[in-house]
Amino acid sequence: MALLLAIESSCDETAVAIVRGSAGQAAEVLASEVSSQIELHREYGGVVPELASRNHSLRLRGLVEKALADAGTAMREIDAFAATSGPGLASSLLIGSTAAKGMACAANKPFLGINHLEGHLLSPFLDRTSVPPHVALIVSGGHTLLLDVEGPGRYRRLGGTRDDAAGEAFDKVGKMLGLQYPGGPEIEKAARAGNPKAYDFPRSMLHDPHLDFSFSGLKTSVLYTLQRADGNVSISDLSASFQQAVIEILVGKTLRAAKRTGRGIIALSGGVSLNRALRAAFQEACAKSDYELVTAVPDFCTDNAAMIAFAALLRHLAGESSPLDEDIHPNLPLV
Ligand code: KG4
Ligand code: ZN
């Protein structure tokens, strides 16, 4: 049995989690603290790196203390310390990584630097006893990535976005429509009262044989529609039509990936996978083609430290660790 403490600070969420587990058993999340900075960055319409790193350092200590108290444990009981080492904002990554290394050094325990994307990727399996072979779609604010997963640590890239990430497209379109940051949840709300067929937006690359995505044409098409109508549009119809285009692209490409690889399981992770219309479309498509759909619980879709602790736990149980002088990597690729 191992007890892991992990820190996530790659962007604008400061998070600390404690997870317990052993090989072949489902991990237990004993504490998962997330302190969101969304309110701080909202007035700027996006994340301001200097504000983010300053607030990570202000909040981290309190969150570590709260996580230990919630888990009913003490620092000396922790078997290994982990932090996100990339990808993300350099000044933000540095805060969490340095703190985790400091704790590991003081406690004379191992440190593990974890790829943020591996955290998202594994999050749907946090409550399972194993990570089976599957096709994974990571859809977040910074990434849209399709992977063939053989098991923990064995990943093959099938495709990804060539321009904007799906969440980034949601956020940019939200901004164009005058909605609050982040745009994803606001567009989902507005779309509920709208007609998804009101506007015929492009489904870029959907029918191309490769498994890459492109969302910038879709975003530009929304902008032109707004400009042509001189702002005189139904926000609900526009949101619903935009959302529908994103959903069809994501579902279409992911099912093609599953068919091509022969995997029977599809796993969805990342902030955009919270979108209920997207989940419903995946559920319907998977049921039709007899695929099992695995999603992360809502709290573990957006950035959190439980997913980082879980990824670290699997690596720790496999005997891995990272050197204490390992650097952060703002552009760290997963494969
Ligand atoms: O995974 P995440 O917290 O951060 C990154 O690693 O990027 O994802 C945040 C992204 C944002 O772009 C946000 O707009 C989007 O997830 N998002 C949504 C929804 N909730 C969050 N997009 C569509 N519908 C939602 N309900
Ligand atoms: Zn993320």
Image (cartoon, rainbow, N blue to C red):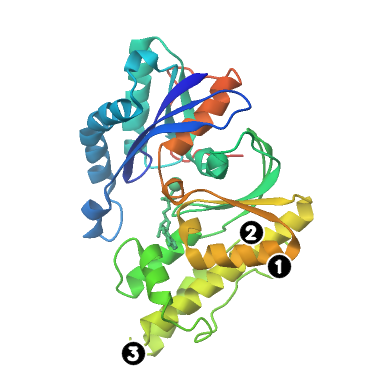
User: Badges 2 and 1: C-beta atoms under 8 Å apart?
Assistant: yes
Q: Is residue 324 above or below residue 247?
A: above
**Circle 2 sits on which residue?**
212
Q: Residue 79 — which label?
A: none
Q: Is residue 215 in view from this perspective? A: no
Give the residue type that dot 3 points to.
Asn
Tell me if label 2 and label 3 are in contact, CB under 8 Å. Answer: no
Which amino acid lies under the numbered mark 1 shown in the image of this protein?
Answer: Asp
Check disc 3 and report the residue beneath it.
232
Crowding at dot 2, Cα within 10 Å, few <14 / some 14-19 / many 20+, comes out as some
**The one of 15 and 207 positioned closer to us in this rendering:** 15
**Percent position (x, y) of residue 17?**
38, 32
Point out the frontmost of discs 3 and 1.
Answer: 3
Q: Distance between the residues labelled 2 and 3?
A: 34 Å
Kindly tell me whether residue 306 is visible in this rendering: yes
Q: Quadrant of the C terminus?
A: top right
Q: Residue at x 27, y 30 (%)?
A: 66
Image-based side of 93 in relation to 165, left or right: left
Mark 3 crowd level (few <14, some 14–19, many ≥20, 10 Å Cα)? few
Is disc 3 placed on a helix, strand or loop? loop
The residue drawn where x is 68% and y is 61% is: 286
Query: What is the secondary structure assignment of the residue under circle 1?
Result: loop
* Residue 259 picture quarter: bottom right
Of mark 2 and mark 3, the one earlier in the sequence is 2
Tell me how far mark 2 sits from mark 1, CA to CA: 9 Å
Tag 2: amino acid? Asp
| Cα separation between marks 3 and 1 | 34 Å
Q: Mark 1 points at which residue?
A: 208
Q: Where is residue 113 in the image (x, y as percent from the top left)?
A: 47, 27
